[in-house]
Image (cartoon, rainbow, N blue to C red):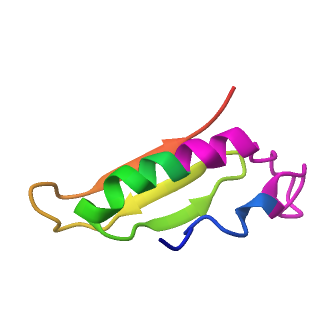
């Protein structure tokens, strides 16, 4: 299986986006990987976006029955 989160490790430093973003912690990426492994076969490939607050967002587009949209936003303390 291809790791859809490859490359997001570069976001583990403060200000990774040059706009003051919080770092995305490695354990958060690992948790998102676990969630993807469990959901990808059923829902397909999500849109993925890092957040400036140190989060990772996973979004499955609308019209994937039985759901109209699924959004997961992972943020660690």
Residue 7 image point, x, y percent:
73, 69
Quadrant into which the C terminus falls: top right
Whether residue 27 appears in magenta in the rendering, the answer is yes
Residue 47 image point, x, y percent:
45, 69
Left or right of 67? Residue 74 is: right
Q: Quadrant of residue 27?
A: top right
Magenta range is: 10-32
Which residue is at the front of the view, 40 or 24? 40
Residue 1 vs 20, above or below: the answer is below
Left or right of 31? Residue 72 is: left
Q: Quadrant of residue 17?
A: bottom right
Which residue is at the front of the view, 17 or 11? 11
Which residue is pictured at 64% across the width and 49% down the height?
29
Q: Principal SS element in the magenta part?
A: loop
Residue 76 vs 1, above or below: the answer is above
Q: Quadrant of residue 69?
A: bottom left
Residue 44 image point, x, y percent:
30, 69
Query: Which residue is outermost to the left?
Result: 66
Which residue is pictured at 34% across the width and 62% down the height?
40
Which residue is pictured at 47% across the width and 71% down the height?
1
């Amino acid at each position: 299986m291809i790791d859809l989160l490859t490359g997001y490790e570069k976001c583990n430093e403060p200000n990774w986006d040059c706009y003051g973003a919080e770092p995305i912690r490695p354990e958060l990426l690992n948790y998102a990987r676990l969630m993807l492994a469990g959901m990808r076969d059923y829902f397909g490939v999500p849109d993925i976006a890092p957040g400036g607050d140190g989060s990772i967002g996973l979004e499955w587009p609308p019209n994937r029955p039985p759901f109209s949209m699924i959004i997961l936003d992972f943020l660690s303390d």
